[in-house]
Amino acid sequence: MGRRDPVSGRWLLRDIDLSIVRGDRIVLAGPNGSGKTLLLRSLCLLDPIDSGEILWHGRPPRNIPQFRRCVVYLHQRPVVSEGTVEDNLRWFFSFKVNRNLRFDRSLITEYLRQFRLDDRFLHKPASLLSGGETQLLALLRALSLQPEILLLDEPTAALDVETVPLFERFVFQWQREANGATVWVSHTSEQIKRVAGRVLHMENGTITREDK
Amino acid sequence: MTTGYVQLTFFQVAIAASLILINGLLSVLLQLRLEWSLLLAALRTVVQLLLIGSILEWVFAADRWYLILAVLAVMTLVAGITAAGRSQHRFPGIYCNSIVSVWASSWLIGSMALFIVAGQFDHWYHPQYSVPLLGMILGNTLNGIALGLNQLGESLISRQARVELALTLGATRWEAAREVVQHAVRTGMIPIINSMMVVGIVNLPGMMTGQILAGAAPLDAVKYQIVIMFFIASATALGTVGVVLLSYRRLFNDRHQFLHWLLRN
């Protein structure tokens, strides 16, 4: 799979060959500008790819919104919309592919408890959240879609030191329960050690090495 | 009420033109440095209007359908190009979108207008009606299209992250872009709605004033104006919706991807 810069025509990603299976814990490592974020964006088909293809359960995904609901990308700096945290956890249920899902308050409350937060968090205006709280909101948002793969772009960069292990443990627990897969972009070697089942080293838009 | 109107002599026009000297004097006194722009603008007003006047005289006299059609086509083309040119955020295909939208909306509504207003004449292309009618429709449609396009580009850039977030959470391209599209159409429609709100109170439309000056009974002129306002409003709506939707189709592909880089150049 490859992707070109739409303006200059330069290849931004090339010769990417990657398969993700249930339970996978993949870390993308590599210097800034090596294409980690672009790879995540291409994996969920947010950006067009210019060579190769992405197969989902053996076939090219036909219904792309449905595919993105299953392969959720979490932006490095998540955006929030107007309103409270709860509003932010509700609005996307109106999308056609999410119609069969419901906002599950008790599940969210249960999730929040694991981060030592309570229902009051839901009533906060989302625009006043700290960077770490916004990441947490983004994670809850993604999980309420009941995805199969989470694409996490430096999810803990904005979290304080004590919350990082909570976050990681929480994601692992979700992975076990949902039998999902995760792809992490990470810069810290300690996190890579804790998180990774497989480490893919990227350089200049391609995967140069894989460690298990 | 008599028909017929006071014909202006070129001497009278020259007296009016000399009033621009007041603007020039003010500009010098207040050091606005607008003298040259004013002079140029005044000259352009005179030259452009004289030019179109003589062309219209000639076309009216020749009374050939293909000549009139050519004039109408040039007017439409210029309107389409101008509307796209005013947008701050251009993308490949913007001119095509704009011209198509202006053309379709103004000619559709324009031919309805001709049919209703000029239906009793022996030929539809009667230039006394077709040219000014289309001109009025175009002028307003152009505004709507320019505003709508500009707003679409602007909101898509400022809300790119939000649009992409919606896409990552399973939105179709329409679900992701709907608010931005609605906002752009609304922005394009504001001027015509505003002018319909205050017409006759704050401003007397140029066409109506012109007809009254030329000796028409005020109520007759008003009837024309009402008809024209609705034609203009519907053409503006069609044109704005058209251009915004066409542009949306260009900026979002059928794989529900937002081609945001098209807006950057």
Image (cartoon, coloured by chain):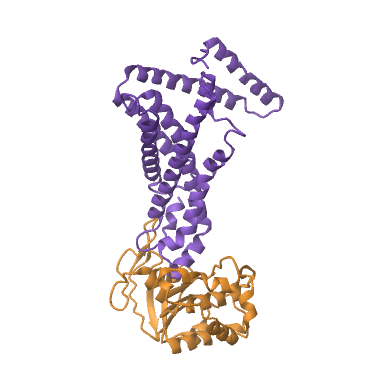
Write the residue at 46% across / 32% down.
B136
Q: Position of residue A182 (x, y in %)?
A: 44, 81
User: Could you say which is closer to the camera, residue A72 or residue A112?
Assistant: A112
On screen, B138 above or below A184? above
Q: Position of residue B250 (x, y in %)?
A: 38, 53
Q: Position of residue A5 (x, y in %)?
A: 39, 60
Q: Is residue B135 visible?
A: yes
Residue lying furthest right in this view? B29
Q: Label the orange chain with its letter.
A: A
Write the residue at 58% across / 65% down.
A82
User: Could you say which is closer to the camera, residue A16 or residue B52?
Assistant: B52
On screen, A58 above or below B36? below
On screen, A110 above or below B143? below
Q: Is residue A190 visible?
A: no
Write the residue at 36% across / 69% down.
A64
How many numbered discs, if any?
0
On screen, B51 above or below B181? above
Q: Position of residue B88 (x, y in %)?
A: 50, 46
Residue B177 in which image quadrant: bottom left
Write the residue at 51% across / 82% down.
A189
| Chain B image colour | purple
